[in-house]
Amino acid sequence: MSDENLSPTLDWRDGTPIATRFDDPYFSLASGPEETRHTFLAGNDLPARLCAGFHIAELGFGTGLNALVTAAAWRGAGRLRYTAFEAYPMALDDMARALAAFPEIDANALLDQWPSDRIALPGVDLEVVRGDVRETLPVWTGRADAWFLDGFAPAKNPEMWEPCLMVEVARHTAPRGTFATYTAAGHVRRALAEAGFTVRRVPGYGRKRHMSRGVLA
């Protein structure tokens, strides 16, 4: 099990943080914000579905880029809810360094309040749930309208993609709620289908030929 107070050890490649524990980057080496928009926003039919009170949940908060891109996409009245599950919260200096690669993204609200567990972004109420998601998700009382499944690659971080965890994702999804993820690994798609989602493999971002998206049946 993880130590919720342990920050990840990083390598850096052209401004992109690489988690040495998993030998995997936190976002696309080409364009992190565009990857988020393609994979997690469009993959969940967002921002079209967004409305006041809409609840997004994320496995793997990382640099916070997905939350910031989501906040920037929200133009409506009222506030969104965003719950992120993170086992290895990034140190403030590392988060600031990573997000500096995207000057078009306003990260000030996140950086000014990090590492608080509850952060007010423009239009978004963010909660960060720290610790091993296999322990924290089963006892979570919320249900998400859309899931961003953004753990490190299944081959390198299999614990984040276990079938029992996908069951918990489904159990904590609102009726007709959705998920999107960059991975199209067969065992992940099967686990999500067995958990109750109708799963589709669709074109991925950049060099990733395919990704997965789905709706709770």
Image (cartoon, grey):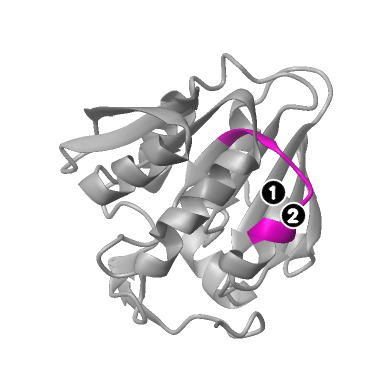
Which-is-in-front pick, marks 1 and 2? 2
Residue at (62% x, 42% y) in the render: 171
Foreground residue, 156 or 117? 156
Q: Number of callouts in the render?
A: 2
Residue at (56% x, 82% y) in the render: 2
Q: Residue 113 is drawn in which quadrant? A: bottom right
Q: Is residue 151 visible?
A: no
Q: Badge 1 local density, few (<14 within 10 Å), some, or many (20+)?
A: many
Q: Is residue 112 visible?
A: yes
Q: State the image coordinates of residue 101 (x, y, percent, origin top left).
A: 43, 56
Q: State the image coordinates of residue 139 (x, y, percent, origin top left).
A: 74, 59
Please give the residue where the numbered disc 1 appears in the rendered image: 83
Q: Badge 2 local density, few (<14 within 10 Å), some, or many (20+)?
A: few
Query: CA gap, disc 1 to disc 2?
Result: 10 Å
Q: State the image coordinates of residue 70 (x, y, percent, origin top left).
A: 59, 35
Q: Residue 82 is drawn in which quadrant? A: top right
Residue type highlighted by circle 2 = Trp
Quadrant the N terminus occupies? bottom right
Circle nearer the N terminus (1, 2): 1
Q: Is residue 96 above or below residue 49?
A: below
Please give the residue where the numbered disc 2 appears in the rendered image: 140
Residue that extends furthest to the top in the rendered view of this protein: 48
Please say whether residue 126 is one of the residues in the magenta stretch.
no
Q: Residues in magenta?
A: 137-146
- SS under mark 2: loop
Q: Is residue 21 above or below residue 211?
A: below
Residue type highlighted by circle 1 = Thr
Foreground residue, 37 or 185? 185
Is residue 73 found left or right of 127 in the rendered image?
left
- SS under mark 1: strand
Residue at (57% x, 66% y) in the render: 134
